[in-house]
């Protein structure tokens, strides 16, 4: 029977009874960071804007009584990302209560937005974010010179493309930015998940060999039929359900991955002159957090070091949640307040 699929960071992930991450979109926990002591009221309205022939639909949050609010445009992680998105709603409402305007929009091909993310490369997705940025800058009640971008996971590839051109955003916030190629990220995530499945050594080797073959098909555009023949054989094995490789009905995956599999965001980061805040959870199973942080910091050596702030949560995962004493995965209570304090300092 075909397995349900979603995308995690750089690939589609077979979801084995769990909700898709889709850009860190998990629901806000009961003990989420509290609203400020005297939260502002805010107005939320639906908006639309266009990137060429792609119509993008979203929600605009504006704090009441603020004439020139700083603002944040939310970028997307991988896979389907659309409203209602509990994590985005939680953050946008919390930030609006703290005096920030926020724009949360459906990724192309999701929700009420047209187009198709599966046939779009990173430049096209970055174009959507850039259009959203320009749209936000033009809104009444928004300070057009104090608009930033926020994104998680795969947005670490896309947002730098959107942020590099002039005029640049006032700041950028990245959560679990991979900082490695998608092919390497897929391999890291797959190896992590396969180890967690406690496969026998031979089964582990077979699963990784099938993954390498899938990546070769995506890279070269050849060998698909031989690969799918191996998949059909592997479906009868006990290890296949733990395998991260796409089945035959997901042929679109190879066309999607081919133009981006070796993408390196570093050149775009080098063009970025705005302050950057990067969050990492050190127990991330999708992205090698320590390697990603080191690569990001290497791009900000010398005089540029003042532009980068990194916040690490030692026990947190890819979505910055960590297990509390009861075993519930919660978001750090200081998450939004630290973000707001950093933005205020960056804009000062």
Image (cartoon, rainbow, N blue to C red):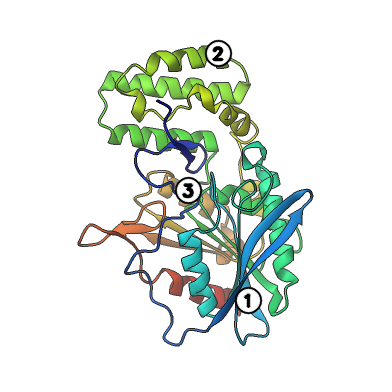
**Residue 54 versus residue 186: which sits nearer the camera?**
54
| Dot 3 or dot 1, earlier in sequence | 1
Q: Eyeballing the image, is 198 above or below 206?
A: below
The residue that label 3 is drawn on is 292
**Percent coordinates x, y for residue 90 in the rendering:** 46, 67
Q: Is residue 294 left or right of residue 147?
A: left
Asked whether the beta carbons under mark 1 and mark 2 sit within 8 Å of each other, the answer is no
Q: Are marks 2 and 3 in contact (CB under 8 Å)?
A: no
- Report how far apart the C-alphas of labels 1 and 2 lie in the structure: 52 Å
Secondary structure, mark 2, is helix
Q: Residues within 10 Å of mark 3 (few under 14, many from 20)?
A: some
Mark 2 — residue? 225
Q: Which residue is mark 1?
A: 70
Instruction: Tell me the crowding category of disc 2: few under 14, some 14 to 19, or many 20 or more residues within 10 angstroms, Cα based.
Output: few
The answer to whether residue 145 is left or right of residue 175 is right
Q: Is residue 121 visible?
A: yes
Q: Earlier in the sequence, mark 1 or mark 2?
A: 1
Residue occupying the point 65% across, 42% down: 116
The x and y percentages for residue 307 are 58, 65
Instruction: Tell me where residue 168 appears, x and y as whole percent.
Output: 71, 63
């Amino acid at each position: 029977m075909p397995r349900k699929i979603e995308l995690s960071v750089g690939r589609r992930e077979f979801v084995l009874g769990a909700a898709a991450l889709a850009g860190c979109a998990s629901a806000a926990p009961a003990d989420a960071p509290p609203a400020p002591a005297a939260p502002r009221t805010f107005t939320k309205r639906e908006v639309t804007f266009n990137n060429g022939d792609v119509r993008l639909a979203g929600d605009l949050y504006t704090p009441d009584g603020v004439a020139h609010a700083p603002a944040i445009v939310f970028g997307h992680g991988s896979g389907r990302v659309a409203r209602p998105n509990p994590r985005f709603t939680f953050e946008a409402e919390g930030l609006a209560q703290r005096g920030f305007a926020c724009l949360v929009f459906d990724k192309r091909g999701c929700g009420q937005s047209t187009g198709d993310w599966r046939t779009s490369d990173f430049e096209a997705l970055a174009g959507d974010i850039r259009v959203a940025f320009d749209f936000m800058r033009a809104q009444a009640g928004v300070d057009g010179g104090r608009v930033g971008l926020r994104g998680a996971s795969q947005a670490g590839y896309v947002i730098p493309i959107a942020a590099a051109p002039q005029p640049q955003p006032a700041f950028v916030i990245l959560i679990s930015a991979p900082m490695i190629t998608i092919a390497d990220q897929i391999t890291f995530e797959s190896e992590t998940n396969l180890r967690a499945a406690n496969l026998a050594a031979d089964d582990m080797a077979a699963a990784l060999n099938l993954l390498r073959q899938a990546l070769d098909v995506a890279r070269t555009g050849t060998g698909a039929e031989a690969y799918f023949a191996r998949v059909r054989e592997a479906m009868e094995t006990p290890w296949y359900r733990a395998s991260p490789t796409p089945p035959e009905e997901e042929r679109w995956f190879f066309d999607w991955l081919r133009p981006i599999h070796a993408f390196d965001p570093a050149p775009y980061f080098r063009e970025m002159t705005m302050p950057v805040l990067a969050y990492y959870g050190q127990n991330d199973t999708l992205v090698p957090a320590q390697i990603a942080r080191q690569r990001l910091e290497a791009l900000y050596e010398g005089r540029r070091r003042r532009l980068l702030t990194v916040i690490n949560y030692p026990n947190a995962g890819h979505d910055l949640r960590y297990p509390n004493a009861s075993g519930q995965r919660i978001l750090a209570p200081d998450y939004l307040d630290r973000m707001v304090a950093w933005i205020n300092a960056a804009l000062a």
